[in-house]
Amino acid sequence: MYDYNDRRPSLPFHFAKNVDTNEWVSVYNVPRGKNTNCYCPVCGEPVGAKNKDKSLALQLQKHQKTAHFYHISKSNCDPSGETIYHLVAKEILEKSKRLFVYSPYEGYSDLVGKTSLVVFDEVIIEKRVSDQITSIQPDAIGIKGKSELYIEFKVTSGINNQKREYLERNKIDCIEIDINEARKGCDPNDIEKIRTNITQLLENGRKNSFRWVRNKKLVKHLKFIRKTEEEKRKSAIEKIKELYSEIEALKEKFWLSDDDLK
Ligand SMILES: [Zn+2]
């Protein structure tokens, strides 16, 4: 079985799109050189294939690079496998609008939250949003009624601090879905299987791949608990003070000393 992790730290540019069908095509399924009839899914430029004498079944020699697509004309665009998996996940979500969302309250025994398949009214992909300080580009924004949920797909690196601070400042709900699980054990030639796995991951959910980056209801709830506890503590202290002053009054009334009360 082909193992992604064997070859190089970042995933190779394995998939491009067919010019005629717009479907994903594996580098192993196109002719070598420039006549692939494929374009780069990131910049749209034509791509060639470096796949001479390579197949999934063959082990690479140490000096050999794995098969990959390349831009035919000079380009600054350098899509990695990570970019491709992101694209696939975004494409699927944009089309299906379906996402299994775990309750942020899971794990809190005293709270019952709703864990369910959400069907968004709309999913917007890679929209740049900004505030006065910075701008960020979430992978996807799911919109349902008046609520918005930012969705990040993780392949290798997770959400960065700039994004996190943006969410915090603007009080935006965000989840992160690790899509690594969807490509584990997959033959990279089999884009359909990868698509099926990603679809299943998005629609059926997988708890270990799902994480709330920020959830305003949860923040509100924790604030509420904290406030209530603080109030309980204050009123308990008040009661103890009252009790002590009552004791002092009784001591005086009945000529009692501290020793008598020991
Ligand atoms: Zn490109």
Image (tube, rainbow, N blue to C red):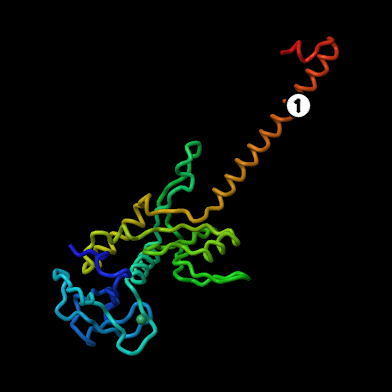
Seen from the viewer's position, the closer of residues 129 and 183 is 183
- Where is residue 94? Give x, y as percent: 40, 66
Instruction: Check the image and name the residue furthest to the bottom.
Output: 73
- Judge from the rendering whether residue 184 lies leftward or rightward of residue 91; answer left or right: left
Would you say 79 lies left or right of 235 here? Answer: left
Q: Quadrant of the C terminus?
A: top right
Ligand 1 quadrant in view = bottom left
Q: Where, by quadrant of the figure, is residue 83 drawn?
A: bottom left
Q: With respect to residue 209, does 72 lie above or below?
A: below
Query: Where does the N terminus fall, quadrant-wise?
Result: bottom left
| Residue drawn at 57 percent across, 49 percent down | 219
> Residue at 76% across / 22% down in the picture?
244
Q: Nearer the viewer, residue 185 or 206?
A: 185
Residue that mark 1 sits on: 241
Q: Secondary structure at mark 1?
A: helix
The answer to whether residue 16 is above or below residue 220 is: below
Residue 7 position by quadrant:
bottom left
Count of numbered circles on the image:
1
Task: List x then y, in percent, for residue 87.
Answer: 36, 70
Identify residue type, mark 1.
Answer: Lys
**Residue 222 appears left or right of 177:** right
Q: Around disc 1, counting alpha carbons within 10 Å, would you say few (fewer than 14), some (14 to 19), or many (20 or more)?
A: few
Q: Is the residue 256 above or below the residue 192 in the image? A: above
Residue shown at 51%/72% (left/top)?
A: 128
Above or below 66: residue 195: above
Towards the viewer: 9 or 35: 9
Within 8 Å: ligand 1 and the Cβ of disc 1?
A: no
* Quarter of the figure with residue 197: bottom left
Residue located at (66% from left, 33% from top): 232
Estimate the x, y position of residue 58 in percent, counting from the top left.
Answer: 14, 71
Could you tell me residue 203's position as x and y percent?
Answer: 35, 55
